[in-house]
């Protein structure tokens, strides 16, 4: 079966985005992380020669460096394209949602079956779909409440207190990419409006 222009476009976009994420993760880990490590070494040397009265200020600087290290490690992990392989699916989704929640003014709620541990291909697909839908609902539409539920089966469900029409859903890139991910792994992508003013997405076997 010949590949459609839209499928080729989506595939090219996904490949480009994966390369960009890998580059960002590498930059954060190697360059920024290396610079922070060098700063930490300089701070240690400075502390050895500093007068005692500098202690409180050096302690404050050390705490700031440790916080920066933690932020860089977290950002590097989240931008790595293989996050769902390096962590359990539940942990990967939790970290993704935590990062998304920091940019979201509304309520982002998770309910995840931590005992559900799918095979790597399925875990990657579920994580990628969840990432796309979370980003779309928290930044692309005017939702103020988003609920993500993952049950074994698998069954991944998103509910948001915003209504998205089918014409809009048919031309929104994140939803097209999520549908493509679902189709590639034999998952069903269901879209509906269970009640006025709300939207539901369900991905299942």
Image (cartoon, rainbow, N blue to C red):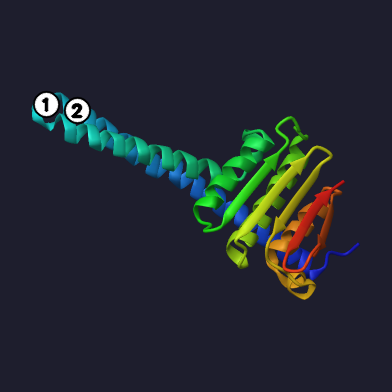
Disc 1: CA contacts within 10 A as few (<14), some (14-19) or many (>=20)? few
Q: How far across and how far down the image is residue 161, in percent?
A: 68, 62
Q: Nearer the viewer, residue 187 or 104?
A: 104
Q: Is residue 60 left or right of residue 12?
A: left
Residue at label 2?
45
| Residue 130 to residue 90: above or below | below
Please give the label number shown on residue 115: none
Q: How far across and how far down the image is residue 170, in percent?
A: 77, 71
Q: Is residue 191 left or right of residue 27?
A: right
Disc 2: CA contacts within 10 A as few (<14), some (14-19) or many (>=20)? few
Label 1: which secondary element: helix
Cβ–Cβ under 8 Å for marks 2 and 1: yes
Q: Is residue 147 left or right of residue 41?
A: right
| Residue at image point 38% right, 38% down | 69
Image quadrant assignment for residue 98: top right
Please give the label number shown on residue 49: 1
| Residue at image point 48% right, 41% down | 74
């Amino acid at each position: 079966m010949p590949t459609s222009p839209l499928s080729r476009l989506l595939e090219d976009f996904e490949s480009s985005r994966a390369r960009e994420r890998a580059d960002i993760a590498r930059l954060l880990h190697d360059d920024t992380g290396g610079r922070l490590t060098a700063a930490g070494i300089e701070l240690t040397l400075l502390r050895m020669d500093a007068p005692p009265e500098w202690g409180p200020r050096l302690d404050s600087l050390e705490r700031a460096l440790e916080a920066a290290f933690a932020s860089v490690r977290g950002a590097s992990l989240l931008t790595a394209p293989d996050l769902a392989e390096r962590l359990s699916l539940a942990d990967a989704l939790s970290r993704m949602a935590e990062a998304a929640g920091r940019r979201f003014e509304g309520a982002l709620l998770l309910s995840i079956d931590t005992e559900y541990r799918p095979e790597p291909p399925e875990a990657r697909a579920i994580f990628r779909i969840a990432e796309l839908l979370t980003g779309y609902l928290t930044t692309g539409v005017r939702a103020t409440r988003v609920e993500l539920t993952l049950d074994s089966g698998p069954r991944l469900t998103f509910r948001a207190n915003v209504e998205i029409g089918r014409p809009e859903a048919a031309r929104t890139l994140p939803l097209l990419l999520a549908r493509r991910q679902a189709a590639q792994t034999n998952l069903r992508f269901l879209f509906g409006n269970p009640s006025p003013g709300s939207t539901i997405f369900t991905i299942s076997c």
